[in-house]
Amino acid sequence: MLKQSFCYPCFLRDGMNLDTLCREAARIGYQGVELWFRDEAFDSVVAAAKAHGLTVASMCGHRSLQVGMNQRQEHPRILGELRESIDLAHRLGIPNLICFSGNRHDGQSDTEGQEACASCLEQITGEAAAAGINLNIELLNSKVDHPGYQCDHVAWGVELCRRVHHPRVKLLFDIYHMQIMDGDIIRYIRDNIGYIGHFHTAGNPGRQDLDGAQELNYSAICRAIADTGYDGFVAHEFRPKADPIEALRVAFAVCAVQ
């Protein structure tokens, strides 16, 4: 069965604490919880996950989403942040770090952006491999949510992975974002599963629940993922319309395929 996780900031509503959220998620069957950039809640996330038998499945390895690896002058900062994150992830058993291409800037071509990102990643892959950590470059849409983001198509991300050519450099395949940009989700997953280290979900349009009001067939998508032999996490990253625990329960059932 696919391992499922959830991005805790999406589901932590007023009146609920992290311990309660993780406890209820574990009861549903979740195996992981994750975060974005480390903040003052980080230690609480780690503690709640440990208390309820969850893996901290993923976190951001560096800042920021907009100013990323495609800017060579930012490489010293990004590499420093990644080294700190790799050490922390190794110590805490976190298998995935999220990396960002950054936004297009100064007329930079796609090829130039890929070359800059590859140069940055090539300097850190050995340390990631030694720690057993995946560096997952996130695919995000530039049409609705993240105007200007460069790694905004599956083909762009795959080409970057090919340039680096290292088993620890993968893609964070966000199904919601790639439905907006590319569509044909199952075919892209099947054809490129070797380059995918992590998945995010959300309903489209709206980035909300995996329900009948959105257009993606998540049962079929998750069955296709399972059929590839993928053994990583599928993580829910949507804003629930109502009760977050019920939304997690429904999402888990939709994606619980063998």
Image (cartoon, helix red, strand yellow):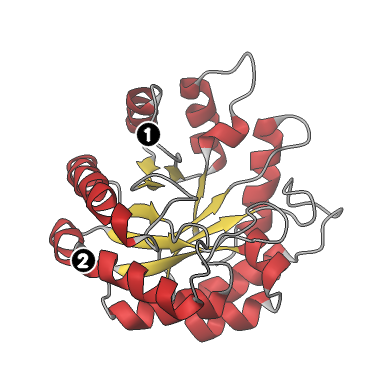
Judge from the rendering whether residue 33 lies leftward or rightward of residue 167; answer left or right. right
Q: Is residue 97 left or right of residue 182?
A: left
Name the residue located 50 percent from the left edge and 76 percent from the top edge.
109
Residue depicted at 76% across the width and 64% down the height: 216
* Residue in the foreground of this view, choosing between 10 and 139: 139
Distance in Å between CA atoms under marks 2 and 1: 21 Å
Q: Which residue is mark 1?
A: 38
Kind of residue indicated by mark 2: Thr
Position in image of residue 107 (x %, y %) = 53, 69
Residue extending farthest to the bottom is 191
Mark 1, Cα crowd under 10 Å, few <14 / some 14-19 / many 20+, is: some
Residue displayed at 36% across by 28% down: 42
Residue type highlighted by circle 1: Arg
Image height check: is 165 above or below 28? below
Q: Quadrant of residue 163?
A: bottom left
Q: Which mark is residue 139?
A: none
Question: Which residue reaches farthest right?
Answer: 213
Figure check: 227 above or below 64: below
Looking at the image, which residue is at 30% across and 47% down? 94
Residue 228 visible, this orientation: no
53 to the left or right of 127: right
Tell me the tag on residue 125.
Answer: 2
